[in-house]
Image (cartoon, grey):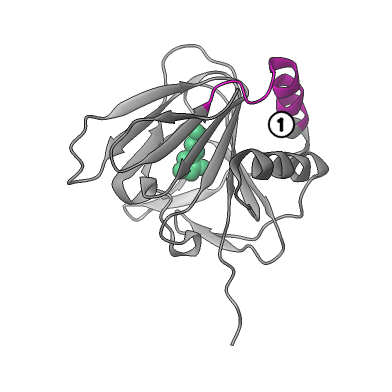
Amino acid sequence: MPLQSLPLPGAELLLDSVFLPADEANALLAQLTAEAAWEQRTIRLFGQELPQPRLTAWYGDADARYTYSGLAWEPRPWLPALAHLRQRLEAATGTRYNSVLLNLYRDGRDSMGWHADDEPELGPAPAIASLSLGAVRRFRLRPRPGVPHAPFGIDLPNGSLLLMRGPTQQHWQHALPKTARPVGPRLNLTFRWVNTAKPG
Ligand SMILES: O=C(O)CCC(=O)C(=O)O
Ligand SMILES: [Fe+2]
């Protein structure tokens, strides 16, 4: 299915809810859950070190170093399955990516808080290709001040591709809230282009 545009002011948001067929998405979920180098990193919040409520792993080209939520990330070399997905996503979205952040939400207690992917390394209008595997979770968006729109939510099913690009990060924040519903694991991959710092 082609990417469909979601009409949000000040955003360019496109969704293909069946980018990968279910059998392929299920196989990838199992493979990446087993193979990725998962870590539970800590974040500093109000002077406290707290474990992030999810597991993460970062893969990319060797020079794609990145600072995210105040944490420095050294990319691990591409796993074959991730390199293959990168090619497919580059073809489907017409954009290049040099890294991918994997987030594993083990159950409904795992989550990601409100943020925008607006780190300087991503540039002013980053294209971020977000592939979801496993349990359906609701992805929420809320406008930053000045954007006349109510908060917005979309369910991201197994195998779906959400593309955020253009001014989306400037005008909107997003989050993956916890849910009290009993849900299985969900693995999300966000492919990004990180501008690499050139020495000297
Ligand atoms: O899990 C998701 O759908 C969102 C992940 C996200 O926002 C991020 O990795 O920056
Ligand atoms: Fe994000």
The residue at 79%/45% (across/down) is: 79
**On the image, which quarter does residue 56 sit in?**
top right
The residue at 56%/65% (across/down) is: 195
* Residue found at the far right of this picture: 80
Mark 1 surroundings within 10 Å by alpha-carbon count, few (fewer than 14), some (14 through 19), many (20 or more): some
The quarter of the rendered structure image containing the C terminus is bottom right
The verdict on residue 183 being magenta is no
The residue at 73%/44% (across/down) is: 87
Say above or below: 161 vs 127.
above
Q: Nearer the viewer, residue 87 or 65?
A: 87
Residue 193 image position (x, y, % from top left): 58, 56
**On the image, which quarter does residue 186 sit in?**
top right
Secondary element type, mark 1? helix
Residue 173 image position (x, y, % from top left): 34, 42
Q: Nearer the viewer, residue 138 or 182?
A: 138
Say above or below: 22 vs 58.
above
| Residue located beneath label 1 in the image | 33
**Magenta span main SS:** helix
Residue 164 image position (x, y, % from top left): 46, 41
The residue at 45%/51% (across/down) is: 43
The verdict on residue 23 being magenta is yes
Does residue 37 show up? no
Q: Nearer the viewer, residue 92 or 172?
A: 92
Residue span colored magenta: 16-31
* Residue found at the far bottom of this picture: 200
Report whether 169 appears left or right of 14. Answer: left
Identity of the amino acid at label 1? Thr
* Residue found at the far top of this picture: 182
Does residue 172 show up? yes
Say above or below: 39 vs 3.
below
